[in-house]
Image (cartoon, grey):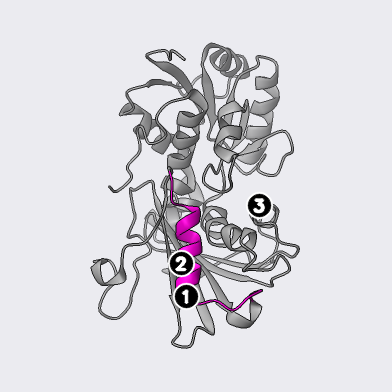
Amino acid sequence: MTLRMTYSIFIDGAAGTTGLQVADRLALHPGVTARSLDDEQRKDNAARQQMMAASDLTILCLPDAAAREAADMAALTNARLIDASSAHRTHANWVYGFPELITGQRDAIAAASRISNPGCYPTGFLALTRPLIDAGILPRDALLSVPAVSGFSGGGNGMIARQADGALPAHGSYGVTLAHKHLPEMVAYAGLSTAPIFMPAVADFYCGMLVNVPLHGAQLAKSVTGQDLHDCLAAHFDGPGLVRMAAARANDDTLLADNLLAADGLANADHMELSVFANQDNSQFWLLARLDNLGKGASGAAVQNMNIALGLDEMMGLSTGV
């Protein structure tokens, strides 16, 4: 198959945090030309629809309601879309944009006209749990808790402004209604029968994320060691993509002498790393995913999906830390 030298990509919502990060990546991408509308036109639906029709692919970096509206407009032009919002993540007509998650997902993305980018927290949670569920180690009816923390950029321009004004606490929990919008996505793509208790928090650093899944050995369907869990995850992600096992802790300069793992240790990187910790008798385990909420958690994932959809090198335009 002969590929065009350059593809045209419309970023709808280029002024937002995710859109700006997508634009930064595409500015260095040798295979595409990024396009956006100026401030006077960015809410002009006719101009947006015309830009969609004239582009090879559109990346929606919009709030949920606006993303749904954009998808309706795109249906009239047969435009190909990647949606970075949460509007379509469990929609039956959209392909979930996590290429490393299961066998065949990358091919599904390559063939799709509608691709929904995963959420930042679900990206870490699903990477830790779905392989263990598929391997028969973690039962589908497991009752899980997911404490997690993100940098304040995850709240978009509004939270960034709050932090700049000094109105953001050093650390704060949210989603305390136990009905966070990420939960349907986490349940559906992990294959769980019960939603986990999801405990997100935001802290006073710009970007980065830790997603934790604590497990008791008694919760598992079979007796395993920490090494078994590590090997299961390592085997699953032993291939192309942006998910990898963390470096040996002794060689990780972000793990300090007091066992402090920096949440912003992968700031500005597009890959995600997974760790498995176990107590001495392997009766308790701590699974941990570390990523940049703006990288593999948002804009980096959108560019990865774009590359796959266009038949380009999957890592093109991305910072993988290699």
Place of residue 304 in the rendered image (x, y in percent of width and height, measured from the top left): 45, 36
Q: Are marks 3 and 1 in contact (CB under 8 Å)?
A: no
Discs 3/1, front: 1
Q: Which residues are magenta?
A: 220-239
Quadrant in which residue 142 is drawn: bottom right
Q: Position of residue 295 (x, y in %)?
A: 41, 46
- 129 over 322 or under it: above or below: below
Q: Are marks 3 and 2 in contact (CB under 8 Å)?
A: no
Q: Is residue 196 above or below residue 111?
A: below
Q: Which amino acid type is marked by label 3? A: Tyr
Q: Mark 3 highlights which residue?
A: 189
Q: Is residue 114 above or below residue 131?
A: above
Furthest residue toward bottom: 281
| Residue 226: mark in rendering | 1
Q: CA distance from mark 3 to mark 2?
A: 21 Å
Q: Is residue 232 shown in magenta?
A: yes
Name the residue rendered at 32%, 60% in the picture: 265
Q: Earlier in the sequence, mark 3 or mark 1?
A: 3
Q: Secondary structure at mark 3?
A: helix
**Cβ–Cβ below 8 Å for labels 1 and 2?**
yes
Q: Which residue was labeled with disc 2?
A: 230
Quarter of the image where one finds residue 209: bottom left
| Disc 2 residue type (three-letter) | His
199 up-or-down from 44: above or below = below
Could you tell me residue 242's position as x and y percent?
42, 46
Magenta highlight on residue 248 = no
Confirm whether residue 16 shows in the render: no
